[in-house]
Image (cartoon, helix red, strand yellow):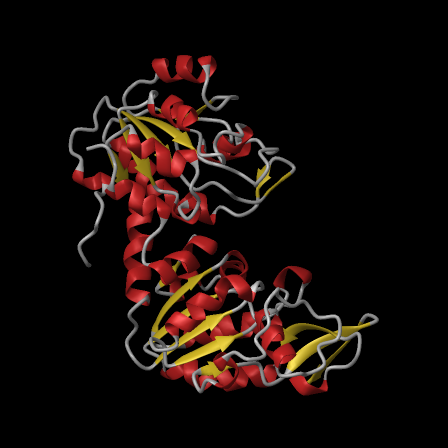
Amino acid sequence: MQKLPFKSITERKDLKGKYVLLRTSMNVPIVDGVVLNQFRITRGLLTLQYLVQQGARVIVCGHIGSDGSQTAAPVAELLRTHMPVVFSEEVAGTKSKNLRDTLQNGEVLLLENLRKDPREKKNDANFARELADMADIYVNDAFPASHRAHASIVSVPQFLPSYAGMNFVHEYSELMEARVPTSPSLFMLGGAKFDTKMPLVEQFLGVYDHIFIGGALANDFFNAKRYEIGDSLISDIDLSDSPLLTHESILLPIDVVVEKNGERRVCAPDAVGYHDVILDAGPQTVAMLAPLIANAKMVLWNGPLGNYEAGYEEQTIETAKLIAQADGYSVVGGGDTVAAIESLFIQEQYNFLSTAGGAMLTFLQEGTLPAIDALIACKK
């Protein structure tokens, strides 16, 4: 493993009795007070359990959702299946401080959803100071949120000795390897909003042997080729004069699934009709990808091949099976992509499943994140 540019919490040997503020990843789907997917929380347990075993007094914080409307109480209930956890109904304040003061060695306090305090997303220094004042040490294990310049991510390290958690280190190490793949290599990118992902595609043109563009991203290419795309989703970008259109490394779906008036059909990309909506790649596309996946020494995949959340999951599922059966090293991220793999119960057949989506893409492009820069520059 390459040398880390920041410190790992496992390097710290004097954790007993120390108050540790653990920024974890708990942005999980919750319905009727129940956590529906435990993937991110489970991956964060290693660091939390380590801190508990070392006798630290752990103050856990994280966010759920974007607007602060959800409570972290269901996360507390889930964590209680692994260890005793006290839950504070506020983020930073008198109640949380009082609960903090009652912690004994190896005990855990979970704070309410950080985004219930608007100062979190505003990266307010006073809010960061309030969080930091509760602890002696800061640990960031929330890699999926680490592309955000929010108070708990980038400002708290200004006030405390700061370290990366175990999942954070794992994410960093695996994704660094994915930035320099062994040939032959295949990068598959799906989802939507090509305008935000175009720099990564351009960067990887000379890095990966093949780059497959799927999902709604492919519609931008079809549109630029002057194909009829009907009512399909496209990005706020014009690729008409882009060299990506004719680059030999770029692959697009060779057949697509479209829907119109509730009826589905499979057709070639240049045979989409007026008012059709492209919602998935077709089976011939997966057949095209099959030998590339089988022969690749590195497969990097982020984003489904179709509108997964709307039920167009068939080709994403079939692709997931192909990668699981292949011998090459596989690195996969993105919520829907990982969900497809989990639905098949084949997680163990992949080399690495990232807990991140947007942060993964940002890191692959930049080689760093705001959180990484903050850890490097932290108070010693």
Q: Position of residue 325 (x, y in %)?
A: 42, 75
Residue drawn 51% across the image and 86% down it = 288
Q: Where is residue 360 in the image (x, y as percent from the top left)?
A: 41, 57
Specify the quadrant that holds the C terminus: top left
Q: Where is residue 82 in the image (x, y as percent from the top left)?
A: 40, 35
Residue 193 occupies which quadrant of the picture?
A: bottom right
Q: Is residue 315 visible?
A: yes
Residue drawn 48% across the image and 77% down it = 212
Q: Is residue 270 left or right of residue 202?
A: right
Q: Where is residue 316 in the image (x, y as percent from the top left)?
A: 56, 70
Specify the quadrant that holds the N terminus: bottom left
Residue drawn 38% across the image and 70% down it = 203
Give whichever of 228, 259 is nearer the camera. Answer: 228
Give whichever of 164, 75 is nearer the camera. Answer: 164
Residue 34 occupies which quadrant of the picture?
A: top right
Q: In this view, does 53 lie to the left or right of 13?
A: right
